[in-house]
Image: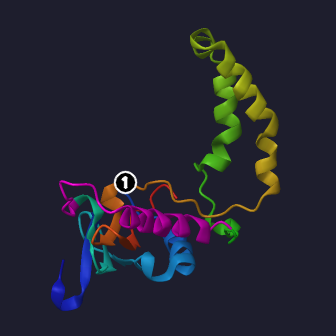
Amino acid sequence: MTPSRAKMPQFRLQRLYEEILKLAYQIHADLVPSVTFFDGFLLLVYGTPVIPGQLHISQVFSLRAPPSWSVSSFLSDLAKFVAKSADRPQPESSYFSLSYTQTARNTLLKLSRNEAFERIEPLCREKVLGLLSKVSLLNEMSPVLSYTDFAKVNIVAIDLVNVTGVIDFDDA
């Protein structure tokens, strides 16, 4: 972190999908840091504004259980984060070709043809075929930004209660 500039550097092996980051920032504002790319380094380097709080994983947990209101407040903040993007259609220019929505049909087809999978649990094949018959419904819905990585290293919070930021939109 560079306190004098209130920026946090991120070193990446792969380029961030900037269209998704812009969309996430438009939807969630201050909960998602804006990202600046710095060119000319061996690794990919991005800078983001400092988010108040600490990564959830590095916060100190009490030996006794936290009060139920703090857990419920934290979960409520995360639920609001997910719900906020549920009614905001994603622009077609930001579709990720390897997203769950884009790959669902092919994945289900592969599972339905997998003989080993059927030998392990025959009922699973029936479930897969049932999903396969409904996968076309995905095309009738507007795609929305879906965040999939709620690991403790990607959530910034204050006092284990208030979510102040969410990072790492690689698989959104």
Residue 143 position in % (x across, y down): 70, 61
- Type of residue at label 1? Ala
Question: For this rendering, which residue is in front, 68 or 114?
Answer: 68
Taking the spot 23% from the left edge, 64% from the top edge, the residue there is 42
Relative to 3, is 68 above or below?
A: above
Q: Main secondary structure of the magenta part?
A: helix
How crowded pointer 1 is (Cα within 10 Å; few <14, some 14-19, many 20+) is rated as: few
Direction from residue 6 to residue 91 in the image, left or right:
right
Is 48 one of the magenta-colored residues? Answer: no
Which residue is the extreme one toward the top? 119
Colour scheme employed for the rendering of this structure: rainbow
The residue stretch that appears in magenta:
58-86
Q: Which residue is mark 1?
A: 151
Q: Tell me which corner region of the image, top left, top right, bottom left or bottom right, holds residue 60.
A: bottom left
Taking the spot 26% from the left edge, 82% from the top edge, the residue there is 7
Direction from residue 153 to residue 145 in the image, left or right:
right
**Quarter of the image containing the N terminus?**
bottom left
Q: Secondary structure at mark 1?
A: loop
Relative to 103, is 116 above or below?
A: above
Is 72 one of the magenta-colored residues? Answer: yes
